[in-house]
Image (tube, helix red, strand yellow):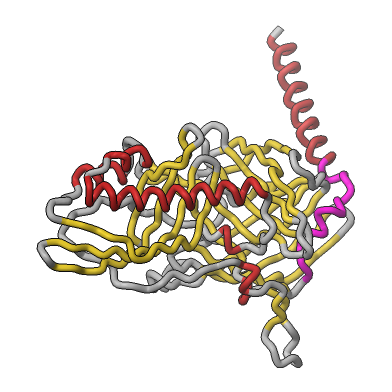
């Protein structure tokens, strides 16, 4: 009897191994998808990506190797260290994009790159149309297996090629990533939703037009041929200013990072995206108008525009308004990034403050965090850049 049990176990293991190998073999046996080939640029292309807090990296497409079963794009680059100045850290980037069957797979070795939590994952899958979905097992930075659900959620037509917006969601934890992948250019924008101290924020980068394009040969006078112009990237540079240091203690969110996804070449976003961004901008304007009324006239409508448990609420409750009047001089909303029910925005503000007969002008560079609750965008918190 024991021999029969052992024999059955051995047969089961053999059959399981055969099935797994057959599945992998089937994926490799699929013909290379021609749609996926259109997504990548040719050899010699340079990507320049930038994000918040002066994050910046450059990558060059070094080689393309192809056989009957797969195409491999080798990409090398470096993250620019503009903050720490630490020489010991590894800022190098090594990426491989592999087209096999109906999938494009990204593999990376890039310790300092602001990119995926997974060193290998499928970033897009054919057919290249809205609603294409897939599920796969990937490993996170702790080496644990995660079930990730990918989906093409938007396809935008552009004169230079279609832009595919793809999401990747860990349903168990709620962690998510988003990429915009454009024909002939590859990945032009990336964001991920991270949680810090109980708050969720978007981090990421977008294509920087003036640094991206094809590298020319040494015989040419120009260093690169730009395919994307600065106006295409729709990027704005923050105004450098001294921040106000008045004695009123203000609690701020820590570790927030604003995404630069809006610096991509996507200039023809769908109407619903534009409407959503406008709603966020309207919420910020309404919030700041209400703040002035709260400070000057104790108008409690301010609390209808914020979450009940966030930094904005706590700051307002402990803010010393005695003898103080304020007036907005400048409010410039530079960038807005939206990921599901969460949004971040970079805002430059100048506020005139009068107290005890003395008038000063406070200048701020804020990162605002918003949540969409019951269909309405509410201010959750803010921090100085």
Rendered location of residue 378, percent (x, y): 42, 42
| Residue 117 visible in the picture | no
Residue 33 in the magenta stretch? The answer is: yes
Rendered location of residue 326, percent (x, y): 24, 58
Q: Residue furthest top?
A: 1
Residue 364, above or below 6: below
Task: Between residue 53 and residue 58, name the one nearer to us.
Answer: 53
Q: Residue at x 79, y 45 (%)?
A: 129
Q: Residue at x 21, y 65 (%)?
A: 245
Task: Between residue 39 and residue 111, name the one nearer to us.
Answer: 39
Residue 65, above or below 19: below
- Horizontal relation, residue 35 to residue 283: left or right: right
Q: Residue furthest front?
A: 297
Rendered location of residue 154, percent (x, y): 70, 46
Task: Between residue 333 and residue 124, name the one nearer to us.
Answer: 333
> Which image quadrant: the C terminus?
bottom left
> Which image quadrant: the N terminus?
top right
Task: Between residue 384 and residue 356, name the one nearer to us.
Answer: 356
| Residue 4 visible in the picture | yes
- Horizontal relation, residue 292 to residue 180: left or right: left
Which residues, given as a range, are shown in magenta? 27-42
């Amino acid at each position: 009897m024991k021999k029969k049990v052992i024999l059955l176990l051995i047969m089961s293991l053999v059959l399981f191994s055969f099935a797994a190998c057959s599945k992998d073999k089937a994926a490799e046996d699929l013909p290379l998808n021609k749609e996926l080939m259109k997504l990548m640029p040719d050899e010699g292309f340079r990507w320049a990506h930038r994000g918040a807090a002066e994050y910046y990296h450059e990558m060059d497409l070094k080689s393309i190797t192809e056989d009957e079963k797969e195409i491999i794009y080798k990409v090398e680059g470096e993250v620019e260290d503009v903050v720490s100045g630490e020489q010991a850290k590894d800022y190098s980037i090594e990426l491989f994009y592999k087209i096999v069957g109906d999938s494009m797979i990204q593999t990376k070795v890039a310790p300092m790159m602001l990119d995926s939590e997974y060193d290998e994952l499928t970033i897009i899958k054919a057919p290249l149309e809205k609603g294409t979905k897939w599920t796969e097992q990937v490993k996170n930075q702790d080496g644990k297996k995660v079930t990730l659900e990918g989906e093409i959620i938007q396809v935008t037509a552009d004169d230079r090629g279609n832009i595919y917006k793809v999401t990747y969601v860990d349903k168990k934890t709620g962690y998510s990533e988003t990429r915009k992948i454009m024909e002939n250019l590859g990945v032009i924008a990336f964001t991920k939703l991270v949680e810090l101290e109980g708050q969720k924020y978007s981090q990421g980068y977008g294509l920087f037009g003036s640094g991206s394009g094809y590298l020319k040969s040494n015989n040419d006078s120009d260093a690169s041929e730009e395919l994307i112009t600065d106006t295409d990237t729709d990027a704005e540079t923050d105004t450098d200013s001294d921040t106000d240091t008045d004695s009123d203690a203000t609690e701020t969110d820590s570790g927030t990072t604003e995404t630069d996804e809006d610096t991509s070449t996507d200039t023809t976003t769908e109407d619903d995206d534009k409407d959503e961004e406008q709603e966020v901008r309207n919420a910020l304007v309404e919030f700041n108008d209400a703040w002035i009324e709260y400070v000057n006239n104790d108008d409690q409508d301010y609390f209808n525009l914020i979450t009940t448990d966030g930094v904005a609420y706590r700051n307002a409750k402990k803010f010393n308004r005695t003898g103080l009047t304020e007036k907005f001089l400048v409010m410039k909303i530079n960038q807005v990034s939206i990921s599901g029910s969460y949004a971040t925005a970079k805002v430059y503000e100048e506020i005139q403050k009068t107290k005890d007969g003395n008038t000063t002008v406070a200048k701020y560079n804020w990162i605002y965090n918003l949540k969409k609750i019951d269909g309405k965008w509410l201010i959750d918190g803010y921090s100085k850049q």
